[in-house]
Image (tube, rainbow, N blue to C red):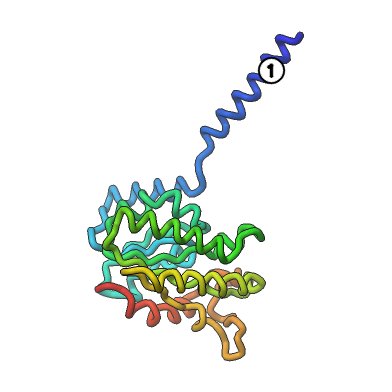
Amino acid sequence: MKKILLFIALFAIAGAIDAQTTTTPPFRKEIDAFRRKDSLEKPAPNSILFTGSSSFTKWTDVKDYFPGYPIVNRAFGGSQLVDMIRYVDEAVIAYRPKQIVIYCGENDVAASDTVTAQLVLDRFKTLFSLIRKKLPNVQIAFVSLKPSPSRWKLEPIYVEANKRIKDFIGKQKKATFINIHDAMLKPNGEVMTDIFLGDNLHMNANGYKIWQPILKPYLLK
């Protein structure tokens, strides 16, 4: 009887280990989809890589906003900075861009009430150092975390995270902080409501029209 119970226990442990080792990491499918797309039409070198989370993913017509700019959009919606760190080689370094434009960090805060502005900064610093190590001369631009009606309660953390990342970037070479946050607020300090889709989180065309003239001066032709 003891041998049977031991066998059952060992079988259960083996099954648990196998499940852990065969579980697909978050966003693996999205990264694989990028690779398939690139195999059919390889992005030109020296492009401007837009990467990060859904505010870029949903900007499907971004090239129409910046005609003449060699933009490659490889953002994967829902991602956090930890996901960008995990896939930095495949989703960033592999493209060998001349400029990297990052929008990410908003989901980190929304995912857990234990994520502070300092933790967002720490994660960004890790990502920044990984990119800089492999691509020492690339221009890196960070687009500030945006406000939104659905995440308005997180606004103080976003504001503080923006401040800390801006301060960090200000001390780095070939790095830029792009503030789109303030332009999305009403004169009374509340977030605009007519620039979002029905979920009050993702932007509609009116929101991207606000972003376009702010981002354009920072993009490399």
List the single residue furthest toward the bottom.
187
Which residue lies most toward the front here? 171
**Front in this rendered view, residue 182 or 132:** 132
Q: Position of residue 15 (x, y in %)?
A: 60, 26
Q: Is residue 139 above or below residue 205?
A: above
- Percent x, y of residue 117: 57, 66
Looking at the picture, tell me which residue is in the foreground, 79 or 40: 79
Residue for point 38% across, 82% down: 213
Looking at the image, which residue is at 58% across and 74% down?
148
Residue at 62% across / 74% down in the picture?
Answer: 156
Residue 20 occupies quadrant: top right
Q: Residue furthest right?
A: 1
The image shows residue 130, relative to residue 169, as above or below, that is above
Q: Position of residue 112 (x, y in %)?
A: 64, 58
- The quarter of the image holding the N terminus is top right
Give the total of numbered labels. Answer: 1
Residue at the disc numbered 1? 8
Residue shown at 36% from the left, 57% from the top: 131
Which of the 4 quarters of the picture holds residue 214? bottom left
> Relative to 142, is 217 above or below?
below
The residue type indicated by label 1 comes to: Ile
Q: With 215 as the anchor, is 46 left or right in this view?
A: left
Q: Quadrant of residue 130?
A: bottom left
User: Badge 1, how many Cα within 10 Å: few under 14, some, many 20+?
Assistant: few
